[in-house]
Image (spheres, rainbow, N blue to C red):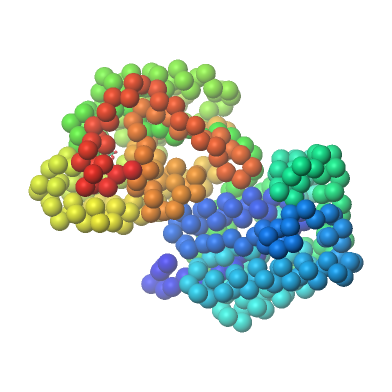
Amino acid sequence: MIYEGQELPKHALVMVGLPARGKTYIARKIARYLSWLGYDTRTFNVGEYRRSQVGARQPASFFDPDDESTSGVREAIARRALDDMVGWLIGGGEVAIYDATNTEKSRRDAIWQRCHAVGIQVVFVESICEDERVVERNVRDNKLRSPDYADVAPEEAVRDFRQRIAFYERNYEPVDEPDRSYVKIIDEGRQVVVNRMAGYFSARLMFFLMNIHPARRKIWLTRHGESVFNTEERIGGDSDLSARGLSYARSLADHMLKQPKTDQLVVWTSTLKRAVQTATHLGIRPVARRALDEIDAGICDGMTYEEIKRDLPEEFSARRGDKFRYRYPRGESYADVIQRLEPIIVDLERQRHPILVVAHQAIIRALYGYLTGRPQEECPHVPIPLHTIVELTPTAYGYEEHRVELEPSLPDRSDAPLSMGPWPQG
Ligand code: F6P
């Protein structure tokens, strides 16, 4: 990725922390966020290397730092993952995440030296958590489901995992290297300590890390109800809802108000009439956000796909050739939409209440792409029909998806055959 006219320096984000401190959760979130923003990002999880090289079922004693036979094996596994990571970055990757405990300073020094020698910038991302209840929750929610404990009775697995943590605690040296770049996330974001984080990429990462938290809340995504422009197959504009769209607004409210914790529901809409009108029956004052407005179709705004094909055939086929990067003259591309949605994503991460987003086809595709970890270029093709709610329920590391079709699924005229066929459409 090019930024400010220069190529992004290669980065290694090196996780640090005792087991069950949410490192993998944070690592996956960073990976999803950076990939969605267009950085070529890859995670190197040393636990996965261990499982593939020596098998998942290793007792806690395998992690005993005083057992020379096993610490040598663990060192070799970590080195292998590091070699792969450095090789991948040298070979063209942009941001690598090295997901391991890295609790000893000597290990961190070795990683730093190795990366520094080939021009890779290292940022340590440490997760510290002293709250026993949080550690217990992490062990029970995540670790017991790990392949390390498949078929092991829960209480035995907890006992073994606690022993593993105790082994790591023996030699744990929290990051305190004044010359290194690091971010320490303390007690799930209650406090964030930052050292030597300069430049655009680091600031972006820091901003994101300061807003994420592991509290689980549902997210609902929906397009507005059918609009007058939808019935005429016109794109963009700012028309009112059609009769069918108004009916969806009522069904949406009925459905949402049956959900748990609706007294806490946060509702965001775009500033366009069709989205605001869709949220009117919820009885909750929505927050209208301009960043959620539909993709700007520039000179094509208000036209039908048929008219674009007839009057602007070059534009039509350029978009067909690369729907993700194609920018409407005086308008936007999907790539532009993603950049403008970045603050919305950070705000979405920050929210601890259930949230409903009422927006538009391209916008919901981009948000959905982020939340479900789809590659950027797939976004413009994700099917997001009208009158359907996408319900996302958080799981240990992602979301489980459930779609609810509320109004009879009459053909969505804006997704007409033209847009399904020659005009690429999910
Ligand atoms: O047709 C409805 C609509 O929301 C238009 O306003 C918008 O231009 C279009 O969908 C985005 O979908 P696509 O990128 O598939 O053209």
Give the vertical position of 113 relative to 295 (above or below). Answer: below
Q: Position of residue 336 (x, y in %)?
A: 35, 54
Instruction: From the viewer's side, name the closer residue of 347 and 14.
Output: 14
Give the residue drawn at x 58%, y 24%. 261
Give the vertical position of 140 relative to 332 (above or below). Answer: above
Instruction: From the viewer's side, name the closer residue of 215 and 72.
Output: 72
Q: Quadrant of the C terminus?
A: top left
Instruction: From the viewer's side, name the closer residue of 239 and 374.
Output: 374
Q: Position of residue 274 (x, y in %)?
A: 31, 30
Name the side, left or right, on which 133 lies relative to 338.
right
Give the vertical position of 9 relative to 239 (above or below). Answer: below
Work out whether residue 396 can be spotted.
yes
Give the residue drawn at x 55%, y 40%. 399
Q: Position of residue 364 (x, y in %)?
A: 39, 40
Q: Quadrant of residue 62 in the image? A: bottom right
Give the farthest residue toward the right. 66
Q: Quadrant of residue 115 in the image? A: bottom right
Name the side, left or right, on which 26 lies relative to 226.
right
Disc count in the image?
0
Q: Quadrant of the N terminus?
A: bottom left
Name the side, left or right, on which 6 lies relative to 181.
left
Q: Position of residue 5 (x, y in %)?
A: 38, 72
Instruction: From the viewer's side, name the closer residue of 144 and 184.
Output: 144
Give the residue drawn at x 50%, y 69%. 93
Give the residue drawn at x 59%, y 60%. 43
Work out whether residue 187 can be spotted.
no
Q: Quadrant of residue 425 in the image? A: top left
Give the farthest residue toward the bottom. 117
* Ligand 1 falls in quadrant: top left
